[in-house]
Amino acid sequence: MDKLAAHNPESNMGDYDKARSTFRWEDVAKNFEFSVTGKVNAAYEAVDRHVEELGDKIALRFLDDEKEVTYTFRELSVASNRFANLLLELGIKQGDRVFIFMPRSIELYVAFFGILKIAAIPVPLFEAFMRAGLLDRMSDCDPVAVVTHNSLKDRIPRDEVPSLKTLIVADGAEGDEISFDENRTRKGTFEPVWLGLDDPLLIHYTSGSTGKPKGVLHAQRAIIGHYQTGKWILDLKKDDVYWCTADPGWVTGTSYGIFAPLLNGVGTTIIRGRFTAKRWYRTIERAGVTVWYTAPTALRLLMGKGEELISEFDLSSLRLILSVGEPLNPEVIHWALKAYKQPIHDTWWMTETGMIMISNYPSMPIKPGSMGKPFPGVEAAIIDDEGVELGVNEVGNLALKKGWPSMMKSIWKRDEKYREYFRHDPWFTSGDAAYVDEDGYFHFHGRVDDVINTAGERVGPFEVESRLVEHPLVVEAAVIGKPDPVRGEIIKAFVVVKEGVDESEELKSELIEFVKKGLAAHAAPREIEFIDTLPKTRSGKIMRRVLKARELGLDLGDLSGAGEGV
Ligand code: PRX
Protein backbone atom coordinates (compact mmCIF):
# COMPACT_ATOMS: atom_id res chain seq x y z
CA MET A 1 0.00 0.00 0.00
CA ASP A 2 1.36 3.42 -0.89
CA LYS A 3 2.24 5.93 1.79
CA LEU A 4 2.23 9.69 1.25
CA ALA A 5 4.84 11.88 2.88
CA ALA A 6 3.56 13.78 5.91
CA HIS A 7 1.67 16.87 4.80
CA ASN A 8 3.03 19.16 7.53
CA PRO A 9 5.65 17.88 9.98
CA GLU A 10 5.54 21.31 11.69
CA SER A 11 1.93 20.92 12.82
CA ASN A 12 0.79 21.65 16.39
CA MET A 13 1.08 18.00 17.36
CA GLY A 14 4.48 17.26 15.85
CA ASP A 15 5.74 13.71 15.99
CA TYR A 16 2.91 11.23 16.60
CA ASP A 17 4.83 8.64 18.62
CA LYS A 18 6.36 11.26 20.85
CA ALA A 19 3.00 12.94 21.45
CA ARG A 20 1.49 9.57 22.31
CA SER A 21 4.21 8.53 24.72
CA THR A 22 3.87 11.58 26.98
CA PHE A 23 0.16 12.37 26.61
CA ARG A 24 -2.08 12.82 29.67
CA TRP A 25 -5.66 14.08 29.59
CA GLU A 26 -5.03 15.73 32.99
CA ASP A 27 -2.55 18.04 31.28
CA VAL A 28 -5.12 19.05 28.66
CA ALA A 29 -7.63 20.00 31.37
CA LYS A 30 -5.14 22.63 32.58
CA ASN A 31 -5.98 24.75 29.52
CA PHE A 32 -9.43 25.46 30.91
CA GLU A 33 -10.50 27.95 33.51
CA PHE A 34 -12.37 25.27 35.41
CA SER A 35 -9.04 23.69 36.29
CA VAL A 36 -8.45 26.77 38.49
CA THR A 37 -12.00 27.71 39.53
CA GLY A 38 -13.56 24.25 39.72
CA LYS A 39 -16.64 25.73 37.97
CA VAL A 40 -17.58 24.27 34.61
CA ASN A 41 -19.81 25.58 31.86
CA ALA A 42 -19.00 24.70 28.25
CA ALA A 43 -20.47 27.96 26.96
CA TYR A 44 -18.22 29.95 29.24
CA GLU A 45 -15.10 28.07 28.12
CA ALA A 46 -16.00 28.30 24.43
CA VAL A 47 -17.16 31.93 24.32
CA ASP A 48 -17.08 34.13 27.43
CA ARG A 49 -13.57 33.44 28.60
CA HIS A 50 -12.18 34.66 25.26
CA VAL A 51 -13.89 38.05 25.51
CA GLU A 52 -11.14 39.73 27.46
CA GLU A 53 -8.36 38.82 25.04
CA LEU A 54 -10.20 38.14 21.77
CA GLY A 55 -13.39 40.16 22.23
CA ASP A 56 -13.26 41.78 18.80
CA LYS A 57 -12.27 38.65 16.95
CA ILE A 58 -14.89 37.06 14.72
CA ALA A 59 -16.39 33.98 16.34
CA LEU A 60 -19.16 33.31 13.79
CA ARG A 61 -19.07 34.19 10.12
CA PHE A 62 -22.37 33.44 8.39
CA LEU A 63 -22.57 33.55 4.60
CA ASP A 64 -25.44 33.05 2.25
CA ASP A 65 -25.69 33.99 -1.40
CA GLU A 66 -26.67 37.58 -0.63
CA LYS A 67 -25.10 38.59 2.62
CA GLU A 68 -22.50 38.05 5.27
CA VAL A 69 -23.16 38.43 9.01
CA THR A 70 -20.40 38.24 11.57
CA TYR A 71 -20.47 38.03 15.37
CA THR A 72 -17.39 38.65 17.46
CA PHE A 73 -16.72 36.64 20.60
CA ARG A 74 -18.03 39.63 22.58
CA GLU A 75 -21.24 39.87 20.52
CA LEU A 76 -21.84 36.14 20.81
CA SER A 77 -21.26 36.30 24.55
CA VAL A 78 -23.72 39.17 25.02
CA ALA A 79 -26.36 37.75 22.65
CA SER A 80 -26.30 34.35 24.36
CA ASN A 81 -26.50 36.08 27.75
CA ARG A 82 -29.66 37.83 26.57
CA PHE A 83 -31.06 34.56 25.35
CA ALA A 84 -30.22 32.86 28.66
CA ASN A 85 -32.09 35.62 30.52
CA LEU A 86 -35.11 35.11 28.28
CA LEU A 87 -35.08 31.36 28.87
CA LEU A 88 -35.03 31.78 32.65
CA GLU A 89 -37.88 34.23 32.43
CA LEU A 90 -39.88 31.65 30.49
CA GLY A 91 -39.40 29.25 33.39
CA ILE A 92 -36.90 27.01 31.65
CA LYS A 93 -34.38 25.60 34.08
CA GLN A 94 -31.34 23.43 34.59
CA GLY A 95 -31.70 19.94 33.13
CA ASP A 96 -34.71 20.78 30.93
CA ARG A 97 -34.43 19.60 27.32
CA VAL A 98 -34.71 22.30 24.68
CA PHE A 99 -34.81 21.32 21.02
CA ILE A 100 -33.11 23.51 18.45
CA PHE A 101 -34.86 22.99 15.13
CA MET A 102 -33.60 25.77 12.91
CA PRO A 103 -32.00 26.41 9.57
CA ARG A 104 -28.36 27.38 9.82
CA SER A 105 -28.23 30.94 11.06
CA ILE A 106 -26.53 33.09 13.69
CA GLU A 107 -29.66 32.64 15.82
CA LEU A 108 -29.09 28.90 16.02
CA TYR A 109 -25.70 29.45 17.67
CA VAL A 110 -26.98 32.18 19.98
CA ALA A 111 -29.75 29.84 21.16
CA PHE A 112 -27.30 26.96 21.60
CA PHE A 113 -25.05 28.92 23.93
CA GLY A 114 -27.97 30.53 25.76
CA ILE A 115 -29.37 27.09 26.54
CA LEU A 116 -25.95 25.89 27.72
CA LYS A 117 -25.54 28.91 29.96
CA ILE A 118 -28.66 28.08 32.00
CA ALA A 119 -27.50 24.42 32.09
CA ALA A 120 -30.55 23.22 30.20
CA ILE A 121 -29.78 20.47 27.66
CA PRO A 122 -29.84 21.46 23.98
CA VAL A 123 -31.07 18.85 21.51
CA PRO A 124 -30.11 20.09 18.04
CA LEU A 125 -32.04 18.51 15.21
CA PHE A 126 -31.32 18.58 11.48
CA GLU A 127 -33.78 20.83 9.68
CA ALA A 128 -34.72 18.13 7.14
CA PHE A 129 -36.71 16.16 9.73
CA MET A 130 -40.47 16.06 9.32
CA ARG A 131 -43.26 15.48 11.80
CA ALA A 132 -42.80 11.73 12.45
CA GLY A 133 -39.04 12.17 12.89
CA LEU A 134 -39.62 14.97 15.37
CA LEU A 135 -42.31 13.11 17.27
CA ASP A 136 -40.14 10.01 17.84
CA ARG A 137 -37.34 12.13 19.23
CA MET A 138 -39.46 14.51 21.26
CA SER A 139 -41.58 11.85 22.88
CA ASP A 140 -38.36 10.17 24.01
CA CYS A 141 -36.86 13.07 25.98
CA ASP A 142 -39.86 15.33 26.69
CA PRO A 143 -38.60 18.80 25.83
CA VAL A 144 -40.17 21.81 27.53
CA ALA A 145 -39.32 24.16 24.66
CA VAL A 146 -38.27 24.32 21.02
CA VAL A 147 -36.30 27.09 19.41
CA THR A 148 -37.35 27.14 15.78
CA HIS A 149 -37.94 29.19 12.68
CA ASN A 150 -41.18 30.27 11.07
CA SER A 151 -40.48 28.10 8.03
CA LEU A 152 -40.16 24.91 10.14
CA LYS A 153 -42.56 25.36 13.04
CA ASP A 154 -45.56 23.68 11.39
CA ARG A 155 -43.76 20.35 11.53
CA ILE A 156 -43.55 20.41 15.33
CA PRO A 157 -46.09 17.95 16.80
CA ARG A 158 -47.06 20.33 19.56
CA ASP A 159 -50.31 18.60 20.55
CA GLU A 160 -48.66 15.21 20.87
CA VAL A 161 -45.82 16.22 23.19
CA PRO A 162 -47.45 17.14 26.52
CA SER A 163 -44.20 18.43 28.07
CA LEU A 164 -43.78 21.01 25.31
CA LYS A 165 -44.93 24.37 26.65
CA THR A 166 -42.89 26.97 24.77
CA LEU A 167 -42.10 27.68 21.15
CA ILE A 168 -39.50 30.35 20.50
CA VAL A 169 -39.81 31.31 16.85
CA ALA A 170 -37.46 33.36 14.70
CA ASP A 171 -38.91 35.42 11.83
CA GLY A 172 -42.61 35.29 12.59
CA ALA A 173 -44.03 34.29 15.99
CA GLU A 174 -47.82 34.07 16.24
CA GLY A 175 -50.36 33.53 19.01
CA ASP A 176 -48.73 32.18 22.17
CA GLU A 177 -45.35 31.70 20.48
CA ILE A 178 -42.43 33.73 21.81
CA SER A 179 -40.57 35.82 19.28
CA PHE A 180 -36.87 35.02 19.09
CA ASP A 181 -36.24 38.78 18.92
CA GLU A 182 -37.58 39.26 22.43
CA ASN A 183 -34.17 38.29 23.77
CA ARG A 184 -32.74 41.52 22.35
CA THR A 185 -34.44 43.56 25.04
CA ARG A 186 -33.10 41.40 27.86
CA LYS A 187 -30.00 42.06 29.95
CA GLY A 188 -26.69 41.37 28.19
CA THR A 189 -25.00 40.03 31.30
CA PHE A 190 -25.48 36.59 32.78
CA GLU A 191 -23.62 34.43 35.25
CA PRO A 192 -23.58 30.93 33.75
CA VAL A 193 -24.97 28.12 35.87
CA TRP A 194 -21.85 26.33 37.10
CA LEU A 195 -21.63 22.59 36.74
CA GLY A 196 -19.33 19.64 37.27
CA LEU A 197 -17.47 17.86 34.48
CA ASP A 198 -19.84 14.92 34.50
CA ASP A 199 -23.01 17.00 34.24
CA PRO A 200 -24.98 16.94 30.96
CA LEU A 201 -23.88 18.93 27.92
CA LEU A 202 -26.22 18.05 25.05
CA ILE A 203 -28.15 15.26 23.36
CA HIS A 204 -27.79 14.08 19.78
CA TYR A 205 -30.22 11.52 18.40
CA THR A 206 -28.73 8.73 16.36
CA SER A 207 -29.93 5.46 14.91
CA GLY A 208 -29.17 1.83 15.57
CA SER A 209 -30.47 -1.12 13.56
CA THR A 210 -33.36 -1.88 15.88
CA GLY A 211 -35.81 0.34 17.71
CA LYS A 212 -36.34 4.05 17.73
CA PRO A 213 -33.50 6.58 17.56
CA LYS A 214 -31.33 6.80 20.64
CA GLY A 215 -30.65 10.00 22.57
CA VAL A 216 -26.91 10.09 23.10
CA LEU A 217 -26.24 12.27 26.15
CA HIS A 218 -22.83 13.89 26.38
CA ALA A 219 -21.21 15.43 29.45
CA GLN A 220 -19.46 18.78 29.96
CA ARG A 221 -16.12 16.94 30.05
CA ALA A 222 -16.49 16.40 26.28
CA ILE A 223 -14.97 19.84 25.70
CA ILE A 224 -11.58 18.54 26.86
CA GLY A 225 -11.57 16.18 23.87
CA HIS A 226 -12.97 18.80 21.48
CA TYR A 227 -10.26 21.24 22.44
CA GLN A 228 -7.31 18.90 22.07
CA THR A 229 -8.45 17.20 18.85
CA GLY A 230 -9.13 20.67 17.45
CA LYS A 231 -5.57 21.59 18.26
CA TRP A 232 -3.85 18.43 17.07
CA ILE A 233 -6.07 17.04 14.32
CA LEU A 234 -7.64 20.19 12.85
CA ASP A 235 -4.28 21.78 13.71
CA LEU A 236 -6.05 25.04 14.57
CA LYS A 237 -3.93 28.13 15.04
CA LYS A 238 -5.11 31.57 16.11
CA ASP A 239 -5.26 33.05 12.58
CA ASP A 240 -7.05 30.17 10.91
CA VAL A 241 -10.30 30.56 9.03
CA TYR A 242 -12.07 27.33 9.71
CA TRP A 243 -15.04 25.75 7.96
CA CYS A 244 -16.81 22.57 9.05
CA THR A 245 -19.48 21.73 6.50
CA ALA A 246 -21.65 19.60 8.83
CA ASP A 247 -24.98 20.84 10.17
CA PRO A 248 -25.19 21.34 13.97
CA GLY A 249 -28.09 18.87 13.89
CA TRP A 250 -25.41 16.16 13.67
CA VAL A 251 -22.57 15.58 16.10
CA THR A 252 -19.85 16.79 13.70
CA GLY A 253 -21.64 20.12 13.48
CA THR A 254 -21.47 20.67 17.25
CA SER A 255 -18.20 18.96 18.29
CA TYR A 256 -16.28 20.38 15.32
CA GLY A 257 -18.55 23.09 13.90
CA ILE A 258 -18.88 24.80 17.29
CA PHE A 259 -16.77 23.56 20.19
CA ALA A 260 -13.38 22.63 18.74
CA PRO A 261 -12.79 25.95 16.95
CA LEU A 262 -14.28 28.28 19.57
CA LEU A 263 -12.54 26.53 22.47
CA ASN A 264 -9.31 27.16 20.57
CA GLY A 265 -10.22 30.82 20.08
CA VAL A 266 -10.78 30.32 16.34
CA GLY A 267 -13.88 31.50 14.49
CA THR A 268 -16.23 29.17 12.65
CA THR A 269 -17.77 29.60 9.19
CA ILE A 270 -21.45 28.87 8.58
CA ILE A 271 -23.20 28.77 5.23
CA ARG A 272 -26.82 28.47 4.23
CA GLY A 273 -28.02 26.82 1.05
CA ARG A 274 -27.81 23.37 -0.44
CA PHE A 275 -24.57 21.82 -1.57
CA THR A 276 -23.40 22.95 -4.99
CA ALA A 277 -19.78 22.77 -6.08
CA LYS A 278 -19.79 26.45 -6.98
CA ARG A 279 -21.32 27.58 -3.70
CA TRP A 280 -18.75 25.59 -1.74
CA TYR A 281 -15.74 26.80 -3.70
CA ARG A 282 -17.08 30.33 -3.53
CA THR A 283 -17.31 29.99 0.26
CA ILE A 284 -13.66 28.97 0.51
CA GLU A 285 -12.70 31.92 -1.65
CA ARG A 286 -14.97 34.48 0.07
CA ALA A 287 -14.04 33.55 3.61
CA GLY A 288 -10.43 32.62 2.82
CA VAL A 289 -10.86 29.22 4.47
CA THR A 290 -7.60 27.68 5.66
CA VAL A 291 -8.82 24.51 7.41
CA TRP A 292 -11.73 22.63 5.88
CA TYR A 293 -13.51 19.68 7.55
CA THR A 294 -15.93 17.93 5.21
CA ALA A 295 -17.21 14.52 4.08
CA PRO A 296 -16.41 11.92 1.41
CA THR A 297 -19.71 12.23 -0.48
CA ALA A 298 -19.14 15.96 -0.93
CA LEU A 299 -15.56 15.35 -2.05
CA ARG A 300 -16.72 12.71 -4.54
CA LEU A 301 -19.32 15.11 -5.92
CA LEU A 302 -16.65 17.80 -6.22
CA MET A 303 -14.35 15.32 -7.94
CA GLY A 304 -17.17 14.64 -10.40
CA LYS A 305 -17.23 18.36 -11.28
CA GLY A 306 -13.59 18.21 -12.29
CA GLU A 307 -10.54 20.40 -12.03
CA GLU A 308 -11.61 23.00 -14.54
CA LEU A 309 -14.20 24.38 -12.15
CA ILE A 310 -11.51 24.79 -9.51
CA SER A 311 -9.54 27.09 -11.79
CA GLU A 312 -12.44 29.58 -11.64
CA PHE A 313 -11.83 30.10 -7.91
CA ASP A 314 -8.95 31.11 -5.71
CA LEU A 315 -8.57 28.27 -3.24
CA SER A 316 -4.98 29.11 -2.34
CA SER A 317 -5.89 29.84 1.31
CA LEU A 318 -6.56 26.14 1.99
CA ARG A 319 -3.82 24.51 4.04
CA LEU A 320 -5.53 21.48 5.57
CA ILE A 321 -8.46 19.31 4.42
CA LEU A 322 -10.11 16.64 6.54
CA SER A 323 -13.03 14.32 6.13
CA VAL A 324 -15.38 12.21 8.25
CA GLY A 325 -18.47 10.06 8.21
CA GLU A 326 -17.88 7.38 5.61
CA PRO A 327 -15.02 5.47 4.04
CA LEU A 328 -12.73 7.83 2.15
CA ASN A 329 -11.63 6.06 -1.00
CA PRO A 330 -7.98 6.39 -2.09
CA GLU A 331 -9.04 7.79 -5.51
CA VAL A 332 -10.36 10.90 -3.78
CA ILE A 333 -7.06 11.45 -1.99
CA HIS A 334 -5.08 11.00 -5.20
CA TRP A 335 -7.41 13.38 -7.00
CA ALA A 336 -7.11 15.96 -4.20
CA LEU A 337 -3.33 15.85 -4.52
CA LYS A 338 -3.74 17.02 -8.09
CA ALA A 339 -6.75 19.27 -7.71
CA TYR A 340 -6.09 20.92 -4.33
CA LYS A 341 -2.34 20.23 -4.20
CA GLN A 342 -2.74 18.44 -0.90
CA PRO A 343 -4.17 15.22 0.50
CA ILE A 344 -7.37 14.66 2.49
CA HIS A 345 -6.98 13.57 6.11
CA ASP A 346 -9.52 10.95 7.08
CA THR A 347 -10.92 10.94 10.62
CA TRP A 348 -13.04 8.26 12.27
CA TRP A 349 -15.47 8.62 15.14
CA MET A 350 -19.15 8.35 16.06
CA THR A 351 -21.93 10.27 17.77
CA GLU A 352 -21.30 8.10 20.83
CA THR A 353 -17.56 8.85 21.00
CA GLY A 354 -18.17 12.61 20.85
CA MET A 355 -14.73 13.32 19.38
CA ILE A 356 -12.36 12.03 16.71
CA MET A 357 -10.82 8.76 17.86
CA ILE A 358 -8.72 7.64 14.88
CA SER A 359 -7.17 9.97 12.39
CA ASN A 360 -4.52 10.84 9.86
CA TYR A 361 -2.51 13.64 11.44
CA PRO A 362 -0.89 16.43 9.43
CA SER A 363 2.53 15.32 10.70
CA MET A 364 2.09 11.62 9.91
CA PRO A 365 2.40 9.87 6.53
CA ILE A 366 -1.03 8.97 5.12
CA LYS A 367 -1.81 5.54 3.80
CA PRO A 368 -4.70 6.22 1.39
CA GLY A 369 -7.55 3.89 2.32
CA SER A 370 -6.67 3.87 6.01
CA MET A 371 -8.45 5.91 8.71
CA GLY A 372 -5.12 6.46 10.44
CA LYS A 373 -4.06 5.86 14.04
CA PRO A 374 -5.73 6.37 17.43
CA PHE A 375 -5.49 9.82 18.96
CA PRO A 376 -2.89 10.12 21.73
CA GLY A 377 -4.81 9.34 24.92
CA VAL A 378 -7.09 6.91 23.08
CA GLU A 379 -6.57 3.17 22.96
CA ALA A 380 -8.18 1.32 20.05
CA ALA A 381 -8.16 -2.39 19.30
CA ILE A 382 -9.80 -5.05 17.18
CA ILE A 383 -11.64 -7.62 19.29
CA ASP A 384 -13.59 -10.77 18.49
CA ASP A 385 -17.16 -11.46 19.60
CA GLU A 386 -15.90 -12.70 22.97
CA GLY A 387 -13.90 -9.52 23.59
CA VAL A 388 -10.49 -11.10 22.88
CA GLU A 389 -8.00 -8.88 21.07
CA LEU A 390 -7.16 -9.97 17.54
CA GLY A 391 -3.84 -9.77 15.75
CA VAL A 392 -2.52 -7.75 12.84
CA ASN A 393 -4.65 -7.80 9.66
CA GLU A 394 -7.48 -9.77 11.31
CA VAL A 395 -10.93 -8.28 10.76
CA GLY A 396 -13.04 -7.90 13.91
CA ASN A 397 -14.95 -5.39 16.04
CA LEU A 398 -13.42 -1.96 16.30
CA ALA A 399 -13.28 -1.20 20.03
CA LEU A 400 -12.04 1.68 22.20
CA LYS A 401 -10.90 1.52 25.80
CA LYS A 402 -13.38 3.51 27.88
CA GLY A 403 -12.38 6.67 29.68
CA TRP A 404 -11.72 9.31 27.02
CA PRO A 405 -13.29 12.66 28.00
CA SER A 406 -15.87 12.99 25.22
CA MET A 407 -17.30 9.50 25.69
CA MET A 408 -21.10 9.64 25.94
CA LYS A 409 -22.54 9.74 29.44
CA SER A 410 -25.62 7.66 28.77
CA ILE A 411 -28.36 6.83 26.31
CA TRP A 412 -31.42 8.80 27.36
CA LYS A 413 -33.82 6.58 29.35
CA ARG A 414 -32.29 3.43 27.86
CA ASP A 415 -29.67 2.04 30.21
CA GLU A 416 -29.66 -1.38 28.63
CA LYS A 417 -28.74 0.15 25.24
CA TYR A 418 -25.87 1.99 26.89
CA ARG A 419 -24.62 -1.16 28.59
CA GLU A 420 -24.64 -3.04 25.28
CA TYR A 421 -21.79 -0.84 24.05
CA PHE A 422 -19.72 -1.97 27.03
CA ARG A 423 -20.52 -5.68 26.89
CA HIS A 424 -16.77 -6.33 26.65
CA ASP A 425 -15.83 -3.97 29.47
CA PRO A 426 -13.43 -2.05 29.50
CA TRP A 427 -13.95 -1.90 25.74
CA PHE A 428 -16.57 0.26 24.05
CA THR A 429 -17.72 -1.72 20.99
CA SER A 430 -18.38 0.57 18.04
CA GLY A 431 -20.51 -1.58 15.72
CA ASP A 432 -17.90 -1.15 12.98
CA ALA A 433 -15.68 -3.92 11.65
CA ALA A 434 -12.06 -3.00 10.95
CA TYR A 435 -8.51 -4.30 11.04
CA VAL A 436 -5.17 -2.88 12.04
CA ASP A 437 -2.13 -3.35 9.81
CA GLU A 438 1.49 -4.06 10.67
CA ASP A 439 2.26 -0.32 10.99
CA GLY A 440 -0.61 0.30 13.42
CA TYR A 441 -2.92 1.97 10.85
CA PHE A 442 -6.62 1.16 11.17
CA HIS A 443 -8.71 0.19 8.13
CA PHE A 444 -12.51 0.34 7.96
CA HIS A 445 -14.21 -2.84 6.83
CA GLY A 446 -17.98 -2.20 7.24
CA ARG A 447 -20.75 -2.09 9.81
CA VAL A 448 -21.47 -5.26 11.75
CA ASP A 449 -25.13 -4.29 12.14
CA ASP A 450 -27.78 -3.06 9.70
CA VAL A 451 -27.18 0.66 10.20
CA ILE A 452 -27.15 2.51 6.87
CA ASN A 453 -24.65 5.24 6.05
CA THR A 454 -25.94 7.30 3.16
CA ALA A 455 -23.90 10.36 2.18
CA GLY A 456 -22.36 10.26 5.67
CA GLU A 457 -25.74 10.34 7.38
CA ARG A 458 -26.58 7.52 9.70
CA VAL A 459 -30.03 6.09 9.11
CA GLY A 460 -31.69 3.34 11.13
CA PRO A 461 -33.58 0.90 8.90
CA PHE A 462 -36.24 0.42 11.56
CA GLU A 463 -37.28 4.06 11.43
CA VAL A 464 -37.72 3.97 7.64
CA GLU A 465 -39.57 0.63 7.79
CA SER A 466 -41.91 1.97 10.49
CA ARG A 467 -42.78 4.91 8.30
CA LEU A 468 -43.36 2.75 5.21
CA VAL A 469 -45.78 0.46 7.01
CA GLU A 470 -47.85 3.49 8.02
CA HIS A 471 -48.84 3.78 4.35
CA PRO A 472 -52.32 2.26 3.92
CA LEU A 473 -51.27 0.00 1.00
CA VAL A 474 -48.15 -1.44 2.68
CA VAL A 475 -48.16 -4.63 4.71
CA GLU A 476 -44.49 -4.96 5.53
CA ALA A 477 -41.17 -3.42 4.59
CA ALA A 478 -37.45 -4.05 5.01
CA VAL A 479 -34.73 -1.55 4.31
CA ILE A 480 -31.06 -2.01 3.48
CA GLY A 481 -28.06 0.09 2.43
CA LYS A 482 -27.05 -0.62 -1.15
CA PRO A 483 -23.51 0.35 -2.22
CA ASP A 484 -23.33 3.48 -4.35
CA PRO A 485 -20.23 5.01 -5.91
CA VAL A 486 -21.02 8.59 -4.83
CA ARG A 487 -23.14 8.34 -1.68
CA GLY A 488 -21.42 5.34 -0.15
CA GLU A 489 -24.80 3.69 0.25
CA ILE A 490 -28.31 4.46 -0.89
CA ILE A 491 -31.43 3.30 0.89
CA LYS A 492 -33.29 0.47 -0.79
CA ALA A 493 -36.67 -0.71 0.49
CA PHE A 494 -38.30 -4.07 -0.11
CA VAL A 495 -42.04 -3.67 0.23
CA VAL A 496 -44.91 -6.13 0.57
CA VAL A 497 -48.20 -4.53 -0.50
CA LYS A 498 -51.79 -5.56 0.25
CA GLU A 499 -53.31 -8.18 -1.97
CA GLY A 500 -54.63 -6.86 -5.27
CA VAL A 501 -52.65 -3.59 -5.10
CA ASP A 502 -51.01 -2.65 -8.37
CA GLU A 503 -47.21 -2.77 -7.92
CA SER A 504 -46.71 0.24 -10.14
CA GLU A 505 -43.95 2.80 -10.66
CA GLU A 506 -46.43 5.45 -9.43
CA LEU A 507 -46.79 3.62 -6.15
CA LYS A 508 -43.02 3.51 -5.78
CA SER A 509 -42.81 7.29 -6.22
CA GLU A 510 -45.69 7.76 -3.82
CA LEU A 511 -43.96 5.67 -1.14
CA ILE A 512 -40.72 7.61 -1.54
CA GLU A 513 -42.63 10.88 -1.13
CA PHE A 514 -44.46 9.41 1.86
CA VAL A 515 -41.17 8.83 3.69
CA LYS A 516 -39.75 12.19 2.62
CA LYS A 517 -42.79 14.11 3.82
CA GLY A 518 -43.28 12.15 7.01
CA LEU A 519 -39.77 11.36 8.22
CA ALA A 520 -36.97 13.16 6.37
CA ALA A 521 -35.66 13.56 2.84
CA HIS A 522 -32.28 12.03 3.70
CA ALA A 523 -34.00 8.93 5.09
CA ALA A 524 -36.19 8.28 2.03
CA PRO A 525 -35.46 5.21 -0.10
CA ARG A 526 -33.98 5.89 -3.53
CA GLU A 527 -34.99 2.46 -4.74
CA ILE A 528 -38.05 0.34 -4.02
CA GLU A 529 -38.65 -3.27 -4.94
CA PHE A 530 -41.96 -5.03 -4.43
CA ILE A 531 -41.59 -8.48 -2.96
CA ASP A 532 -44.09 -11.23 -2.00
CA THR A 533 -42.68 -12.11 1.42
CA LEU A 534 -39.80 -10.87 3.53
CA PRO A 535 -37.15 -13.32 4.74
CA LYS A 536 -37.57 -13.83 8.49
CA THR A 537 -36.05 -15.76 11.36
CA ARG A 538 -38.22 -18.46 12.92
CA SER A 539 -39.11 -15.97 15.66
CA GLY A 540 -40.37 -13.54 13.02
CA LYS A 541 -37.51 -10.98 12.85
CA ILE A 542 -36.79 -9.59 9.39
CA MET A 543 -33.42 -10.84 8.04
CA ARG A 544 -32.14 -7.75 6.28
CA ARG A 545 -28.79 -9.36 5.67
CA VAL A 546 -30.46 -11.97 3.46
CA LEU A 547 -31.97 -9.24 1.30
CA LYS A 548 -28.62 -7.50 1.17
CA ALA A 549 -26.74 -10.65 0.19
CA ARG A 550 -29.30 -11.35 -2.53
CA GLU A 551 -29.07 -7.80 -3.79
CA LEU A 552 -25.30 -8.00 -4.01
CA GLY A 553 -25.21 -11.56 -5.32
CA LEU A 554 -23.27 -12.75 -2.25
CA ASP A 555 -23.21 -15.97 -0.29
CA LEU A 556 -26.14 -15.96 2.18
CA GLY A 557 -23.96 -17.13 5.08
CA ASP A 558 -25.26 -19.03 8.09
CA LEU A 559 -29.04 -19.34 7.83
CA SER A 560 -29.61 -21.76 10.70
CA GLY A 561 -32.11 -19.38 12.35
CA ALA A 562 -34.06 -18.78 9.17
CA GLY A 563 -37.74 -19.38 8.76
CA GLU A 564 -40.31 -17.95 6.38
CA GLY A 565 -39.37 -16.35 3.07
CA VAL A 566 -35.70 -17.37 2.92
O1 PRX B 1 -19.66 3.40 10.43
C1 PRX B 1 -18.87 4.47 10.88
C2 PRX B 1 -19.08 5.68 10.00
O2 PRX B 1 -20.06 6.48 10.62
C3 PRX B 1 -20.50 5.86 11.84
C4 PRX B 1 -20.83 6.90 12.85
O3 PRX B 1 -21.88 7.67 12.37
P1 PRX B 1 -22.38 8.94 13.20
O4 PRX B 1 -22.61 8.55 14.61
O5 PRX B 1 -23.50 9.52 12.44
O6 PRX B 1 -21.14 9.91 13.19
C5 PRX B 1 -20.66 10.39 11.98
C6 PRX B 1 -19.55 11.38 12.17
C7 PRX B 1 -18.86 11.40 13.45
C8 PRX B 1 -19.35 4.96 12.24
O7 PRX B 1 -19.77 3.95 13.10
N1 PRX B 1 -17.83 6.45 9.88
C9 PRX B 1 -17.48 7.58 10.53
N2 PRX B 1 -16.27 7.99 10.12
C10 PRX B 1 -15.82 7.10 9.21
C11 PRX B 1 -16.81 6.11 9.06
N3 PRX B 1 -16.65 5.06 8.24
C12 PRX B 1 -15.51 4.96 7.54
N4 PRX B 1 -14.51 5.88 7.63
C13 PRX B 1 -14.62 6.95 8.45
N5 PRX B 1 -13.65 7.86 8.53
Image: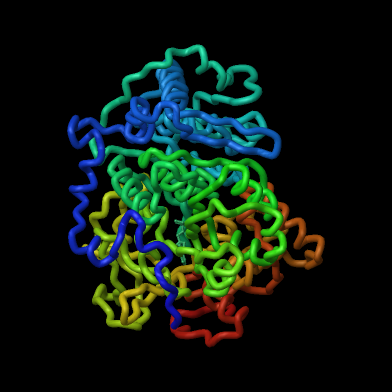
Looking at the image, which residue is at 28% across and 82% down? 391
The scheme the figure's colours follow is rainbow
Query: Where is residue 413, by image quadrant?
Result: top left
Indicate the position of residue 195 as horizontal and vertical percent values: 26, 32
Looking at the image, which residue is at 31% across and 42% down? 219
Looking at the image, which residue is at 30% across and 60% down? 14
Query: Where is residue 425, by image quadrant?
Result: bottom left
Query: Where is residue 363, by image quadrant?
Result: bottom left
Indicate the position of residue 244 as horizontal and vertical percent values: 51, 49
Pick the residue in front: 52 or 379: 52
Pick the residue in front: 107 or 292: 292
Inspect this view and state whether residue 522 appears.
Answer: yes
Looking at the image, which residue is at 37% across and 26% down? 51
Inspect this view and state whether residue 480 appears.
Answer: no
Apparent side of residue 526 relative to residue 329 in the rendered image (left or right) = right
Q: In this view, does 415 lie above or below 547?
A: above
Quadrant assignment for the N terminus = bottom left
Apparent side of residue 296 relative to residue 222 in the rendered image (left or right) = right
The count of marks equals 0
Quadrant assignment for the C terminus = bottom right
